[in-house]
Image: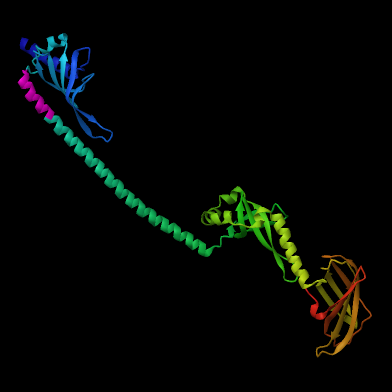
């Protein structure tokens, strides 16, 4: 029974010592013969003869020197010598679980522990180095793989954009099924497809139209069309801006800075071209008839001269199919007709009678009398018809 109690006491002491922390409360000094400290890269670096504030994580107490009160310990990371106080010495000198050794024996055992720790942390450092190298290799492989995938993806996107550029002009912006209104005029557009635009500023599309003027002349007109949120979220609209957004935002055109002045200028320029072709005006339309042998006549005329028209007299000739003259005459319309104004005159009956074979009328000339008394004759080769 006594032997059993002694064995039990040894186990309790051994267990207590293994879980024991050594600090200033139970020891006078604590020195690590070797101590392995992990650096910022995860490798364990050996430190020798390091004074410690505390010794913990004890793996084993492998020897005790009763003469010097020195307890030799192996921890998870160190080989330590702890100089215990008197209270702990009284326990340790009687402990059967801790070998009582002399200096030479302890030196030999300490070398063994040092070697054991050195081999342990050499393996850990090798494993750490392998882990880092494997990680670097994997990162390199992943980077190469991602670069390859990105290259393929970018090439695919680039081809898609190239194909889009071949099929779509940057000025034709998709606005499918969207109602847009101009803030400068009363124009409203609803397109199922695209809208011709000169640029994009501050959520506004600058839509271009070609407005007809007389005598085959036309001019560019710019409309400010605010883009609603529904259009901004449209996939076709967004993709067009992904491909051509820079062009639409960077395009330089005076129309985008002052569209009203631009529109006035282009309209005025077109009007001057019309005036150059027809300095005294032009016929919007005209017509005649000889029903029942009596000639009827009508015409619509626009004045392009700065002088106001008082009278406008139209001289004509009626012929048959072989060119025989059947009747000549004139009709005079009374103004006033100011510059760029248009007026109509109509003769439902007249005193002019023609034979039944009359088939064609030609206008030979026009004599215009202005309010200032001046007159101008416009010969047939100078007449303009819209």
Q: Which residues are magenta?
A: 101-114
Residue 37, compared with residue 224, is above or below; it is above
| Figure quadrant of residue 169 | bottom right
Say whether residue 111 is magenta.
yes
Residue 270, compared with residue 329, is above or below; it is above
Looking at the image, how many numbered discs can be counted on the residues? 0
Q: Position of residue 331 (x, y in %)?
A: 90, 76
* Res 205 visible: yes
Describe residue 344's horizontal placement relative to residue 14 as left or right. right
Residue at left offset 90%, top offset 72%: 374
Q: Quadrant of the C terminus?
A: bottom right
Describe residue 151's horizontal placement relative to residue 18 as left or right. right
| Figure quadrant of residue 19 | top left
Q: Position of residue 196 (x, y in %)?
A: 62, 60
Describe residue 381's horizontal placement relative to residue 238 as left or right. right
What colour scheme has been applied to the protein in the rendered image? Answer: rainbow
Residue at left offset 86%, top offset 88%: 325
Front in this rendered view, residue 334 or 352: 334
Residue at left offset 8%, top offset 15%: 96
Front in this rendered view, residue 99 or 307: 307
Describe residue 229's horizontal placement relative to residue 19 as left or right. right
Q: Position of residue 366 (x, y in %)?
A: 86, 77
Residue at left offset 24%, top offset 43%: 133
């Amino acid at each position: 029974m006594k032997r059993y109690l002694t064995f039990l006491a040894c186990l309790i002491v051994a267990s207590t010592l293994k879980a024991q922390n050594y600090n200033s409360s139970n020891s006078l000094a604590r020195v690590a013969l070797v101590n392995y400290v992990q650096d910022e890269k995860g490798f364990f670096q050996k430190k020798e003869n390091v004074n410690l504030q505390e010794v913990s994580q004890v793996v084993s107490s492998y020897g005790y020197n009763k003469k010097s009160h020195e307890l030799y310990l192996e921890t998870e990371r160190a080989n330590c010598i702890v100089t215990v106080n008197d209270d702990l010495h009284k326990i340790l000198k009687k402990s059967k679980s801790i070998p009582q050794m002399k200096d030479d024996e302890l030196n030999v055992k300490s070398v063994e522990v040092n070697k054991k720790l050195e081999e342990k942390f050499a393996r850990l450092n090798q494993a750490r180095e392998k882990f880092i190298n494997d990680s670097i290799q994997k990162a390199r492989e992943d980077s190469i793989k991602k670069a390859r995938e990105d290259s393929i993806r970018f090439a695919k996107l680039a081809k898609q954009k190239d194909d889009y550029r071949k099929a779509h002009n940057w000025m034709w912006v998709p606005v499918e099924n969207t109602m847009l209104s101009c803030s400068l005029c009363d124009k409203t557009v609803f397109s199922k497809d695209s809208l011709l635009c000169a640029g994009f500023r501050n959520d506004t599309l600058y839509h271009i139209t070609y407005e007809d003027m007389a005598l085959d002349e036309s001019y560019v007109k710019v409309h400010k069309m605010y883009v609603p949120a529904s259009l901004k979220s449209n996939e076709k609209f967004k993709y067009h801006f992904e491909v051509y957004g820079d062009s639409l935002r960077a395009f330089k055109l005076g129309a985008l800075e002052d569209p009203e002045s631009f529109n006035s200028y282009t309209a005025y320029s077109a009007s001057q071209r019309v005036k150059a072709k027809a300095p005294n005006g032009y016929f919007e339309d005209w017509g005649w008839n000889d029903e029942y042998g009596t000639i009827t006549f009508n015409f619509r005329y626009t004045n392009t001269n700065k002088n106001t028209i008082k009278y406008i007299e139209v001289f004509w000739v009626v012929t048959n199919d072989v060119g025989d003259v059947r009747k000549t005459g004139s009709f005079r319309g009374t103004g006033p007709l100011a510059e760029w104004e248009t007026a109509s005159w109509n003769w439902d009956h007249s005193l002019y009678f023609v034979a039944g074979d009359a088939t064609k009328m030609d206008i030979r000339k026009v004599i215009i009398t202005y309010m200032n008394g001046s007159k101008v004759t416009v010969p047939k080769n100078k007449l303009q018809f819209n």
